[in-house]
Amino acid sequence: MCIFRNLFNRTPSAYNNFKHYNTVSGVKMNQINKFDYVKSYETEDRCLPNCWIVVRIDGKNFHKFCDLHNLEKPNDKRSLELMNRSAACVMKEFQDINIAYGQSDEYSFVFKKDTTMFSRRKDKLLTNVVSLFASSFSYFWSIYFGSAKLLYPPSFDGRIVLYPTDKNLRDYLNWRQADAHINNLYNTVFWALVNKKGLTTVEAQERLKGTLSGEKNEILFKEFGINYNNEPALYKKGTVLIRKVMNDPNSDRTRKTTIAMNCDIIGDDFWKEHHEILEMKTSKLYENSENFQTYYRCCPVIFLPF
């Protein structure tokens, strides 16, 4: 610093030249400043206040992805568990997500109504969630698929939808779970006809054309001995991720835990039991998992690592 001070004292013009240059690129600072106007073309679209912010991601061209990676049909448990793990990673990073719901190759993340994350900028919320989910899916791949190689990087698209009322939000989640049931019932019958009866995909599609839910159940039971009611809840109902506070068995402290539940969210029971979700209150303290196992006797509960 003393060397520069002495230099500039002797040659003032040298200092004037120095302060107008970027020491790394050699570009004049006044040249940089004249380009600042390009920032005015940027837009910052913000989510409306006092609305639930739902970020929904979907696998891009996952039919091709499933075929190339030989995923089991109609459901691949490994893939669904990988989706849940990736979603839990997103919830760990973004604490303003109150609840998430996933089925098939999609996941919906619900940010609380009063979140100020990224100043509620749509582009920031969307890109951060989608990119973290996609990178987590690739990162955890080997844990669930072992030596099966990931042949190419999977990608996900995303969208943001705003819901002003609690009823709007519940109706949205009801819609997604109803969609999970309808699609899974169809796919279960469809692939039974293809894999077990030897029909082509076109023949199976024609066989199921115009059939109602009861008729699909009848085909499953009479022709394949499958009682759809006994199918895993993971496939029929999808997965709900919520936050709970648990007592840490290794210390006197409590810890936040992301819990995956394969249960009904269309009825009122879930929302009464977990009323803190819509009320945006602190997660409830549960002594141990028996609280869940007792209340959701038929609904598996998984304690994820985050």
Image (cartoon, rainbow, N blue to C red):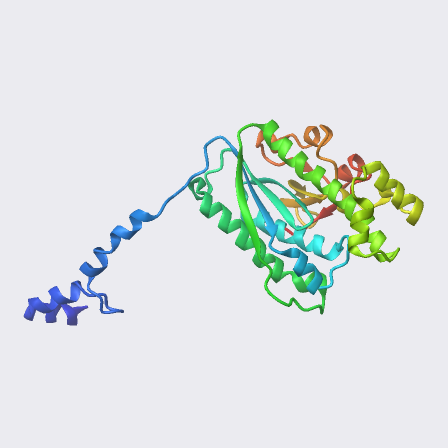
Query: What count of labels does the image hold?
Result: 0
81 is higher (above) or lower (below) than 283: below
Front-most of residues 34 and 84 = 34
**For this view, does 43 lie left or right of residue 186?**
left
* Quarter occupied by the N terminus: bottom left
Q: Is residue 253 visible?
A: no
* Residue 235 horizontal/vertical position (percent): 76, 47
**For this view, does 160 lie left or right of residue 253?**
left
Q: Going 81% across and 52% down the picture, which residue do you hit?
A: 203
* Residue 180 horizontal/vertical position (percent): 72, 42
Q: Going 65% across and 45% down the picture, which residue do you hit?
A: 257
Front-most of residues 180 and 170 = 180
Front-most of residues 258 and 127 = 127
**For this view, does 105 lie left or right of residue 40?**
right
* Residue 240 horizontal/vertical position (percent): 68, 42
Q: Going 46% across and 32% down the picture, which residue do you hit?
A: 49
Q: Is residue 202 visible?
A: yes
Q: Going 74% across and 60% down the picture, which residue do you hit?
A: 71
* Residue 54 horizontal/vertical position (percent): 56, 39
37 is higher (above) or lower (below) than 283: below
Image quarter for residue 66?
bottom right
